[in-house]
Amino acid sequence: MATPERLVVIGGDAAGMAAASQARRHKGPEALTVTAFERGHFTSYSACGIPYWVGGVVDGPDALIARTAEEHRARDIDLRLRTEVTEIDLDRGRVRSRDLADGGREAWTGFDKLVVATGARPLRPPLPGIDAPGVYGVQTLDDGQRLLYGLRGAAGRRAVVIGAGYIGVEMAEALVHRGFQVTVLDQGAQPMSTLDPDMGALVRTAMCDMGIEVVTGARVTGVLTDQDEGRARAVVTEDAEYPADVVVLGLGVRPETALAEAAGLPLGASGGLRTDLALRVAGQEHVWAGGDCVEVRDLVTGEHRHIALGTHANKHGQVIGANVAGGYATFPGVVGTAVSKVCDLEIARTGLLESQARAAGLRFVTVTIESTSRAGYYPEARPMHVKMLAERRTGRLLGVQIVGREGAAKRVDIAAVALTAGMTVERMTALDLGYAPPFSPVWDPVLVAARKADAAVRAAGSTGPR
C-alpha cells in the first residue's frame, strides 16, 4: 500500500482550516494525512464578529466558531491547538513546533506539502506604555476574551480607541454599547482612511452625533500608567492627554510573515507572501499560502496589495485545498470591497480611492450624489451619499464609496460586480436593478451616481485631452 502524502498547515483559522477541510474532502486519510498547527485556543472562527461580541450584540465565543477542533479531528485532521510553529525547514521538508500548553516542548513534523496561513498581526507601535495592562489589541478570540475581562474590571467608564479605521470605529461602537464614554484618536484628517477625506467627514459627523469624541490629526506619543499597578490611565498625544480606563488599539494589521521570511519565502512590497493564481508561493512547487498573510492582485490596477478580509481568506482556503489534493482552482484577485458600520451608520467602499487612482497613474473624474434608501415618499427613507470614480478616457468604473443609513452598505455589491466585469459607468446606467418603493427610488442611488459620472466623463472628453 502506498504511503500517504503529508500535508502540514500553519494557522488554524479561515484560510488554513478551509484548505485542510477542502483537501480532506478530495482525499481520504489513506492518501493524505493532514496536520494543522494553531497557537491560539480556538479554530475556524469569525474574527469579524469580535466587535459585536464585545459590544454584547451577539454571543461568543462559541457562537463565532464555525467548526470546533473536535469536529475537525472527527474528519481525520490532526489539529493541534496551543502549538506554535517556530521554524520552517524547506530543504528537509519539516516544521518545528512548540507546545505552548506543555512547557514549551518542541518537535519536528515532516511534510510533503505545506500551507502557510499565519494571518496578520495588529499594529502595536513601540510607544511608552503600549504593552501596559489595560491596553488591548483585537485580532483573535483570545484577544476578545481578554478585552471583555478588562471591561468588566475597569475602574471607570472611559475608553480611548487609537485608530479610526474599520477596527477602530467598530470597537468604538462596541464600547458605546457597553456604556463607555468613548474617545477615538487618529492621525488622519478624517476617520476611515479607507475612504476619501470628504466621505470620511460624513463618518466623523455621524460619530460625533452619537456621542463619540473624534480627535483627528492626533499623533499618539504614549500611554500613561498608574503608580500602583502599572495599568493604563491615559493616552497622550503631542497636544493633549486623554484619561482612559481602557485603551483599545485599532491601528490596522500587517501580514504575519516573519516565519515565512526566515525560511526564505518571497515577500511583496507590503510584506505579504507572493503567490501565483493557484496560490502557490512563488518559486515553490509544494508550498501554498493564503489569507491575511498574502498579497492579492487588484483587478482594477493589476498591481498586488495586502487586503485582510475573512471573505478572501475562506476563498483562498478552498482554492488551496483543491490544488493540494491534485485538483485545479485559481484565485484571480479582488476589487477591494469592504463594509462596516458604526451604530446606525453604514460605510462601504470598493475599488480605488482618489489617492490610489493617482498612485496608479490614472486620470479620472469623481462625482458625489445624495439620494435616499427608498422612494422619497415612502416612510423611513434615509439619506445616502454615493461617491464614484471613473477613468476619464474610457469611462471605466474605478471605485465607489457609500455612506448612509439602513440599506446603504450592501448597495456597494452592485459596484463590486461592475468593477469585476470591467464595466463603464455608461453601461452601468442600463443595469436592470430591482425596484419597489420600499427598497429604492426609481433610479437607485448607485445608478444616479453612474449617470452623473458618465456625464462628467463626456464633459471631460469635450474640454481637454483624454
Image (cartoon, grey):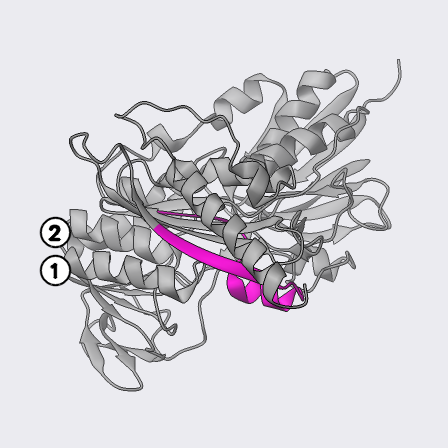
Front-most of residues 200 and 46: 200
Q: Which residue is mark 1?
A: 157
Q: Which residues are magenta?
A: 347-369
Q: Residues within 10 Å of mark 1 (few under 14, many from 20)?
A: some
Secondary structure of the residue carrying tag 2 is loop
Amino acid type for the residue under numbered disc 1 = Arg
Amino acid type for the residue under numbered disc 2 = Gly
Front-most of residues 409 and 368: 368
Q: Can you give x and y, in whole percent of width and height, for residue 146 in the image? A: 31, 51
Who's the residue at 74% across and 32% down the image? Answer: 7
**In the rendered image of this protein, does residue 417 appear above or below residue 122?**
above
**Left or right for 370, reference 139:** left
Extreme residue toward the bottom, this view? 239
**Left or right for 147, reference 398:** left
When asked about the image quadrant of residue 10, the answer is: top right
Extreme residue toward the right, this view? 2
Is residue 31 visible in the rendered image? The answer is: yes
Q: Can you give x and y, in whole percent of width and height, for residue 118 in the image? A: 60, 48
Who's the residue at 21% across and 52% down the image? Answer: 175
